[in-house]
Image: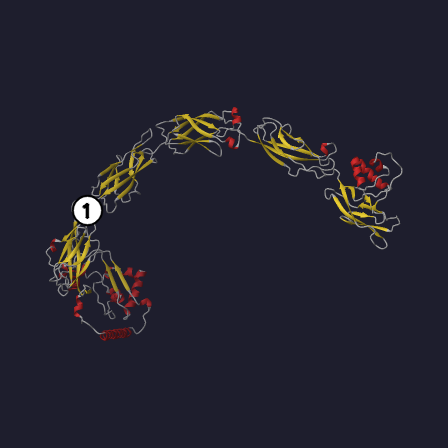
């Protein structure tokens, strides 16, 4: 079995003596029971009450647990203990081997004597114990002499760690005016030493800074208020330093500190007060509604929700003219205009304004009252105001046939100022671009300036301006809405051109067209039209009109047997009347074509020339006719092309292919009988004209009028560069017999008196709506025969209806 012999060396004895000194009798008992060597005689004296004897009974030591102090600072290895086997005779034949945690690194063993030493510095806070295994071997054979046994080496704690505040520094808040003993915060310090062994980890708290305002519980670390009526407005922030000391706070213990920043939170313990009891303000009478007049402020030493204010007007003659609102950001009362002000009506107002805290605390009501009042005097300042219209808008109804210059409304404005300046009226022309109305500058009488037409403009929205005579910058305005009432001034008419057809095989009473009418008027009782034939066509034997009594009419045939060869087109005049006052009417013409139809009244042809063609042509005949026409066209084009190439043997230069001469005069011409105005031959060949020769003059054009060049001085023509250039060009063109003939344009401002046609101007033409007669064209000679055929009356006309 494992045993151990007595320790006789001085080192082991010194180590044991030190252990006994520090840890007392309990430590000695633990050491003996664990097998730690004890001086001879010491153990027996501790375990028995019998007298000490010099003889000792041999026993085996319990050695499976060793103790060693941490933080050994010596230079030699620290002796831990000794292992010994009963089979060890001291001759070195036994070899001790150590294995397990820290073997060979932290702990070593003398393989001959069994002494165990610690070769590294031990720290219980890093590792509290080590588990190792010991074995005794035969040194020669290596055979185990004893079974392997396990033992523990425990590290004994010393006070080598100070308390630490792991959560520091701390921040705390406590309401101001809190009672004494109000808990603020709890601080906790941690000591890494062994709390189960001695007082190394027993922590006591104390306050180093922060008295007399705060105190700390020495055992729990709870910080409490120590002074009553701490006022945030006097001091808001406190820095408290707390100390934690181990060894129960005894002398020699280690200590640690932390900082606690304590803030006093606000409570509503200060009532609001106005710094001034009277405010003087002024406002212009032209200030718009909701504009700011001024601000009042009730000072409150509290903050946040406890400093919120509510301002109200509690008294005064201006409660109906002004409002007061609270600015939520700056807690000021903003006085605004509630309704329009007038200096002429009231020049000053007095307000009694109250400022109060809306959030109160019952326990501080004795410090109140938590409201205050002040007086506000507001003066209204006079300004030069623009004229004011009474009423603020006008609505006028006027018939469209009202005479020009008729007064339709009197516009009235006045100067609201005390001076009561004179007013001048005008119309904003941007609102009346057509200038339909006029307003009298002094009386404000609104009159019509142009005829009104409801069908063109049924509404007029104009703006009448009123300006002060002494201050033209002061201008007032008023809207005037004018409704133009309808009068019956437009006759009904067809909405479009009506063109109908009647079949040759139509029977009497057959419907050929339904017509309607439109009227731009808008009578109050609605439109109603009446249809009939015009008086000149009332007895025609061909067609009649049947009024449907619903603003439409039917056109019916009166007979049958229409023939295109007899008359292909009928013009039927229809008289349309309205129901207005006065009754207006107009005549609309319905064009009716006679067409050939099949048995189902489907139109086949409405052209009378169709009867002159064969009834039916075969497809081959049509192709032959078209082929002949095509061949003839080709021959004609070929002949024309050959003639052109024959007349133009060379290509004409692009710059000389066209020659024009435009002569413009501002004097009046003489008409067709004036042949003395200008001799164009002088421009065709000026050089030969000057020389009096005409050997190579153009033969295709003859002079029509005598030249006026004799009236132009020749010196001017010679000295003029432009004139010389024109003459040179004309000469080159005159010598070119293949050039195209010239154009001569003569412009007159008025017709000559000698013209056969007379004046063609439209300035003195007839202005009536009746069609103009062109029968006089037949008297103008053969030159106007074509015009006479187009516009003149044909001989023997067929009936129109």
Front residue of 691/689: it is 689
**What secondary structure is marked by label 1?**
loop
**Figure disc tally:** 1
The one nearer the camera, 532 or 4, is: 4
Residue for point 28% across, 71% down = 738
From the viewer's side, name the closer residue of 639 and 355.
Answer: 355
Query: In the picture, residue 417 is in which quadrant?
Result: top left
Does residue 416 appear left or right of residue 796 in this picture? right
View extreme (top): residue = 366
For the residue pair 740 and 370, the one nearer the viewer reads as 370
List the residue tagged with mark 1. 489
Give the colour scheme of this rendering: secondary structure
Left or right, 277 with reference to 140: left
Vertical placement of residue 167 versus 750, above or below: above
**Is 47 placed above or below 700 here?**
above
Say if residue 71 shows up in the picture. Answer: no
Coordinates of residue 503 in the picture (x, y in percent): 16, 63
Give neighbour class at mark 1: few <14, some 14-19, many 20+ (Cα, 10 Å).
some
Pinpoint residue 515: horizontal percent, then vertical percent.
Answer: 19, 55
Q: Position of residue 172 (x, y in %)?
A: 60, 34
Location of residue 460 with respect to 653 vertically, above or below: above
In this rendering, position of residue 591 left or right of residue 303: left
Q: Is residue 782 above or below residue 486?
A: below
The image quarter in which residue 312 lies: top left
Image location of residue 111, percent across then percent down: 83, 49
Res. 479 in view? yes
Q: In the visual, does 141 lie left or right of 329?
A: right
Q: Quadrant of the C terminus?
A: bottom left
């Amino acid at each position: 079995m494992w045993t151990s012999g007595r320790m006789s060396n001085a080192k082991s004895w010194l180590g044991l003596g030190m252990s006994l000194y520090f840890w007392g009798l309990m430590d000695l008992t633990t050491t003996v029971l664990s097998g730690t060597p004890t001086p001879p005689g010491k153990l027996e004296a501790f375990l028995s009450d019998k007298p000490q004897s010099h003889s000792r009974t041999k026993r085996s030591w319990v050695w499976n647990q060793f103790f060693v102090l941490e933080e050994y600072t010596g230079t030699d290895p620290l002796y831990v203990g000794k292992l010994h086997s009963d089979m060890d005779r001291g001759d070195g034949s036994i070899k001790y081997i150590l294995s397990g945690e820290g073997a060979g690194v932290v702990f070593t063993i003398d393989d001959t004597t069994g002494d165990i030493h610690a070769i590294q510095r031990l720290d219980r806070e890093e590792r509290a114990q080590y588990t190792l295994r010991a074995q005794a071997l035969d040194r020669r054979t290596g055979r185990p002499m004893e079974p392997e046994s396990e033992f523990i080496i425990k590290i004994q704690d010393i006070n080598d760690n100070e308390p630490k505040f792991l959560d520091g520094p701390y921040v705390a808040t406590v309401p101001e005016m809190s009672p004494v003993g109000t808990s603020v915060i709890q601080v906790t310090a941690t000591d890494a030493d062994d709390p189960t062994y001695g007082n190394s980890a027993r922590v006591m708290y104390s306050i180093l800074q922060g008295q007399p305002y705060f105190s700390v519980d020495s055992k729990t670390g709870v910080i409490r208020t120590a002074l009553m009526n701490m006022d945030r407005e006097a001091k808001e922030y406190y820095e408290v330093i707390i100390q934690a000391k181990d060894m129960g706070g005894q002398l020699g213990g280690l200590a640690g500190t932390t900082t606690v920043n304590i803030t006093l939170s606000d409570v509503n313990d200060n009532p609001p007060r106005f710094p001034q009891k009277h405010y003087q303000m002024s406002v212009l009478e032209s200030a718009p509604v909701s504009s700011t007049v001024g601000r009042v402020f009730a000072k409150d030493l509290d903050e946040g929700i406890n400093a919120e204010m509510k301002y109200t007007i509690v008294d005064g003659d201006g409660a109906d003219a002004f409002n007061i609102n609270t600015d939520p950001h700056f807690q000021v009362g903003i006085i605004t205009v509630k309704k329009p002000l007038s200096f002429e009506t009231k020049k000053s107002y007095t307000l009694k304004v109250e400022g109060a805290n809306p959030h109160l605390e019952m326990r501080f009501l004795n410090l109140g009252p938590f409201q205050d009042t002040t007086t506000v005097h507001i003066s209204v300042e006079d300004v030069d105001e623009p004229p004011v219209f009474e009423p603020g808008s006008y609505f006028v109804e006027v018939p469209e046939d009202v005479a020009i210059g008729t007064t339709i409304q009197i516009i009235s404005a006045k100067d609201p100022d005390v001076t009561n300046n004179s007013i001048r009226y005008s119309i904003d022309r941007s609102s009346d671009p057509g200038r339909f109305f006029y307003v009298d500058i002094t009386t404000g009488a609104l009159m019509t300036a142009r005829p009104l037409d409801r069908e063109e403009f049924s509404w007029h929205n104009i703006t009448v301006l009123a300006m002060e005579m002494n201050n033209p910058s002061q201008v007032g305005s008023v809207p005037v809405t004018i409704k133009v009432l309808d009068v019956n001034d437009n006759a009904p008419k067809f909405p479009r051109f009506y063109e109908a057809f009647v079949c040759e095989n139509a029977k009497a009473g057959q419907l050929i067209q339904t017509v309607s009418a439109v009227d731009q008027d808008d009578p109050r009782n609605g439109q109603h039209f009446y249809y009939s034939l015009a008086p000149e066509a009332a007895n025609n034997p061909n067609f009649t009109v049947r009024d449907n009594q619903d603003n439409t009419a039917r056109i019916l045939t009166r007979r049958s047997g229409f023939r295109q060869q007899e008359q292909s087109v009928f013009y039927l005049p229809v008289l349309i009347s309205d129901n207005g006052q006065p009754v207006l009417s107009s005549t609309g013409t319905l064009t009716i074509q006679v067409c050939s139809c099949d048995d189902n009244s489907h139109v086949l042809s409405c052209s009378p020339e169709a009867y002159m063609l064969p009834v039916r042509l075969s497809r081959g005949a049509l192709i032959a006719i078209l082929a002949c026409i095509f061949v003839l066209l080709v021959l004609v084009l070929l002949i024309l092309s050959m003639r052109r190439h024959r007349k133009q043997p060379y290509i004409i230069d692009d710059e000389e292919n066209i020659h024009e001469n435009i002569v413009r005069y501002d004097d009046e011409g003489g008409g067709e009988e004036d042949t003395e105005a200008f001799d164009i031959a002088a421009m065709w060949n000026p050089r030969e004209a000057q020389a009096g020769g005409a050997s190579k003059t153009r033969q295709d054009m003859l002079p029509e009028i005598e030249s006026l060049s004799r009236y132009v001085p020749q010196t001017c023509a010679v000295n003029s560069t432009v004139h010389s250039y024109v003459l040179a060009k004309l000469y080159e063109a005159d010598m070119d017999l293949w050039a195209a003939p010239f154009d001569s344009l003569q412009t007159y401002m008025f017709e000559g008196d000698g013209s056969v046609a007379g004046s063609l101007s439209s300035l003195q033409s007839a202005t009536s709506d009746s069609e103009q007669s062109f029968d006089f064209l037949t008297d103008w000679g053969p030159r106007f025969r074509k015009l006479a055929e187009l516009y003149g009356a044909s001989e023997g006309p067929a009936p129109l209806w």
